[in-house]
Structure formats: structure tokens, C-alpha cells
């Protein structure tokens, strides 16, 4: 058996690593959900995770895929979504980032990510990150006109025991125009903040840097507190909120 075969992660039946949902959507918007799935390929034997952690916030953005799907439907926008857990490889991190393949997430240990060889790391990059990156690039380049790009994430109500009161975060990298305009369009009664609970200095805007900035696309990264999108009612509420904020912001950008 060759070395490459020894380090194959995904079987043909388990792949691909990413998918496009609603590929023929007519809106000039590309939605992205890098942390949509908790799936871990069988070859990685659950990464040694404790059973209670397999579908925790460490493995995926809880509610993120449901919210992204609801927005894709409401806006008629294509959605590029990862199909592999971020614990296998975090598609919102470049290959040289230490947390692209984390051995610990908050208080959760990931034994299967400890002491990985360079060959093991390279296999994760080539089988998970590169297909996701390529699919997103192809999708963006397939629009007739440059689209707006929105990435969708969720975050936990507490982090290392510290409560987070923010409900909706609008994050940006070098271009704050869309995030700031969406903030102006935010509804009353929702705690919406710019660059919370993270910002670009935390390394969370990789997808924006890799795909939106070089193309000159209006872009924003969304963070919704996951207890607010834990059921269908919450998902529908925030899909309406975000859809309205984005639509109004895009209209203001065009008219300005």
C-alpha cells in the first residue's frame, strides 16, 4: 500500500467534503457555512472524543446549517457548506494556523488531533480544506456579476464560564462597509454588535480574506448565539432578521 493510500481520510461514500445547496439560486448573494457538520470519517474513529462531545459546539456550529438553509431558501441564494466536522479540519482557518486542527476546543480534548505527523496534517488539508476552498472559489466565480458574500456561524452562550450577552455579531475584515450598514439596519430588541464575540484579530475572518477581499466583494461574517437558533422557531426568526438586514443593507449600498 502506498503512503498516500495509508493516509486517506474520506471514502468515496463519505465524501465529498463540501457541497453547494441551491446552486442555481438567483440572488446575487453567496452564503457560506464552514462549520455546518459534525461528521467525522470512520477512519478517524471519532477522534477519540467522549460521546457527549461528538455533537457539541466543539464539533460544529449548532444551528448554523439550519440557519444557512433557511436563508438560502428565503433569499434564493446559493449556499456552500462543509460536510465534515471542524475538528477534522476547520475550513475557516488556513493550513498554517495552529487551530485549523485543534487538539483542544475550550474545555474539550480532541485526542485524535494530538501529535499529528506532517503527513496526517497534509491529508486533512488535501481532503477537507482544499475541496471546500475550491468549491467556494468555483461558486463565486460562477456568478454573472460579483455577489455579496455572507458567512454564517453560531457561538456558545458562555465561554470558559463567562456569559455572552450579545445575540448577533456582525464581523468584518478590512472592509467594514456591509457589516456597518447591516448594523444600521438592525431591529430593535436584538443585541446586535459589531465584531463580537470575536474580531479579525482572533483569526476568524480567513474565508473573507481568502475569497471575498481579493475579489473586491462586499462581505460580512455572521455570528448568532446558538441558544437562539436551537429550534425551528428561533431559526425562522433569525433567518427573517438577517434576511431583512442584508436586503436593506444591499439596497443602501447600491443607492449610496
Image (spheres, rainbow, N blue to C red):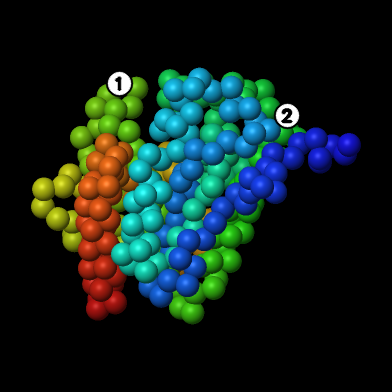
Q: Is residue 130 visible?
A: yes
Name the secondary structure under disc 1. Answer: loop
Q: Is residue 194 visible?
A: no
Q: Residue at x 17, y 44 (%)?
A: 191
Whole-percent x, y for residue 222 in the image = 34, 50
Quadrant position of the N terminus in the picture: top right
How many marks can you see? 2
Q: Residues within 10 Å of mark 1 (few under 14, many from 20)?
A: few
Whole-percent x, y for residue 244 in the image = 22, 63
Q: Residue at x 29, y 40 (%)?
A: 230
Label of residue 161 in the image: 1
Whole-percent x, y for residue 144 in the image = 49, 79
Name the secondary structure under disc 2. Answer: loop
- Residue 121 lies, with reference to residue 176, above or below; the image says above
Please identify the residue farthest to the left as the structure is shown. 188
* Residue to which mark 2 is pinned: 117
Q: Residue at x 81, y 40 (%)?
A: 5
Quadrant position of the C terminus in the picture: bottom left
Q: Residues within 10 Å of mark 2 (few under 14, many from 20)?
A: few
Q: Nearer the viewer, residue 209 or 242?
A: 242
- Residue 242 lies, with reference to residue 121, above or below; the image says below
Report how far apart the C-alphas of labels 2 and 1 lie in the structure. 33 Å
Q: Are marks 2 and 1 in contact (CB under 8 Å)?
A: no
Is 138 displayed left or right of 208 in the figure? right
Q: Residue at x 58, y 36 (%)?
A: 40
Label of residue 124 in the image: none
Mark 2 vs mark 1: which is more N-terminal? 2
Please identify the residue farthest to the front as the structure is shown. 13
Whole-percent x, y for residue 127 in the image = 67, 46
Q: Nearer the viewer, residue 237 or 172?
A: 237
Amino acid at each position: 500500500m502506498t503512503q498516500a493510500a495509508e493516509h486517506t481520510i474520506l471514502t468515496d461514500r463519505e465524501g465529498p467534503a463540501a457541497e453547494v445547496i441551491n446552486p442555481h439560486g438567483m440572488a446575487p448573494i453567496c452564503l457560506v457555512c464552514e462549520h455546518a457538520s459534525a461528521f467525522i470519517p470512520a477512519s478517524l474513529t471519532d477522534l477519540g472524543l467522549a460521546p457527549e462531545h461528538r455533537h457539541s459546539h466543539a464539533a460544529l456550529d449548532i444551528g448554523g446549517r439550519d440557519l444557512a438553509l433557511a436563508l438560502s431558501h428565503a433569499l434564493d441564494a446559493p449556499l456552500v457548506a462543509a460536510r465534515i466536522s471542524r475538528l477534522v479540519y476547520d475550513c475557516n482557518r488556513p493550513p498554517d494556523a495552529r487551530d485549523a486542527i485543534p487538539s483542544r476546543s475550550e474545555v474539550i480534548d480532541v485526542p485524535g488531533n494530538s501529535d499529528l505527523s506532517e503527513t496526517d496534517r497534509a491529508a486533512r488539508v488535501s481532503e477537507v480544506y482544499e475541496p471546500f476552498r475550491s468549491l467556494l472559489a468555483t461558486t463565486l466565480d460562477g456568478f454573472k456579476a460579483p455577489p455579496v458574500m455572507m458567512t454564517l456561524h453560531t457561538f456558545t452562550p458562555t465561554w470558559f464560564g463567562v456569559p455572552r450577552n450579545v445575540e448577533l455579531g456582525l464581523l468584518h475584515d478590512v472592509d467594514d462597509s456591509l457589516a456597518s450598514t447591516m448594523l444600521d439596519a438592525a431591529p430593535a430588541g436584538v443585541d446586535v454588535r459589531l465584531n463580537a464575540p470575536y474580531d479579525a484579530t482572533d483569526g476568524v475572518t480567513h474565508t473573507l480574506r481568502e475569497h471575498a477581499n481579493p475579489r473586491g466583494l462586499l462581505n460580512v461574517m455572521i455570528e448568532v448565539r446558538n441558544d437562539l437558533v436551537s429550534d425551528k422557531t428561533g431559526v425562522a426568526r433569525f433567518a427573517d432578521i438577517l434576511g431583512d438586514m442584508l436586503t436593506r443593507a444591499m439596497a443602501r449600498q447600491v443607492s449610496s
